[in-house]
Image (spheres, grey):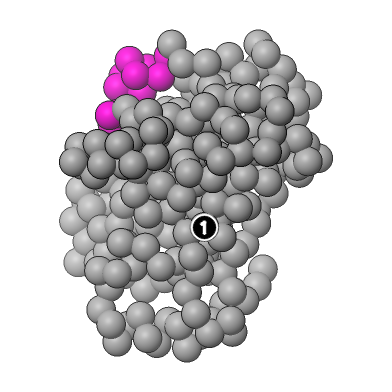
Amino acid sequence: MTHNKKTALVTGGTRGIGAEISRALKADGHNVIAIYAGNKKAAESFEKETGIETLKCDVSSFKDVQKVCATLDVDILVNNAGITRDRMLHKMEPEDWQEVMRVNLDSCFNMCRVIVPNMRTKSWGRIINISSINGQKGQMGQCNYAAAKAGMIGFTKSLALENAIKKITVNAICPGYIDTEMTATMDAGVLENIVKQIPKGRMGKAEEIAAIVSFLASEKAAFINGSTITANGGQYMV
């Protein structure tokens, strides 16, 4: 438990990994706001169940982020929102590329551009970007997703350098295959083959990623900055 209550904002914070991150930060004693894109029913159900405030925002739109987030006093920002539009590059539509880039990578710029100035004024902040194992090793059919998630890692390092003097840390987490709604939609055979490649012999749990976020958001992690933390059961070692 923390004795110093902060305000945490989690994008894509009402489902999957994001929902567990929101819950963990609330359990740490923070005031949590979970941002969702379009699934109002899921957001309402999540808010009712957890007591965590939810806000609708298109994180891929700078104007929308400005409108929704400009007046919020955010101490901890978790950029977790992400989508997939998987297809081999030679068959990929330009919109599949652009949409993944906007939601997964442009959103990091949009959120940070709006929120970082206030963190700099206060001389304190935590930014945690949820990247992916596939941003480190690549994946067939995911040129768009892998490029966006790799972009997040470079973004993390640069932003960490720019803001270290202001006591703001910026770190990335690269989860491997985690048991969520997103992986549940995958072909069972494909999923089985992936699990065979994980030395741990299972997929990860969303709570395990949330625990890393909880630590990185704390004072205990003040000296960790510009880092990429892998949590993939040993499937890919950098």
Q: What percent of the width, then of the height, locates residue 1?
A: 68, 38
Which amino acid is tagged 1? Glu
Q: Which of the 4 image quarters holds residue 53? A: top left
Which residue corresponds to the image point at 19% horizontal and 66% vertical from the top-left?
91
Q: What percent of the width, then of the height, locates residue 207?
A: 52, 57
Location of the C terminus (image quadrant): bottom right
Identify which residue, 43 or 129, lies in the foreground. 43
Q: Which of the 4 image quarters holds residue 63? A: top left
Which residue corresponds to the image point at 58% horizontal and 14% vertical from the top-left?
118
Identify which residue, 218 or 237, lies in the foreground. 218
Residue 169, visible in the rendered structure: no
Q: What percent of the width, then of the height, locates residue 234?
A: 62, 76
Q: Which residues are magenta?
A: 56-70
Identify which residue, 14 or 2, lies in the foreground. 2
- Residue 1, compared with residue 122, is above or below; it is below
Which residue corresponds to the image point at 50% horizontal and 69% vertical from the top-left?
204
Residue on which disc 1 sits:
207
Q: Is residue 59 magenta?
A: yes
Question: How many numbered markers are drawn?
Answer: 1
Which residue corresponds to the image point at 31% horizontal and 52% vertical from the top-left?
83
- Residue 60, compared with residue 134, is above or below; it is above
Q: Is residue 206 magenta?
A: no
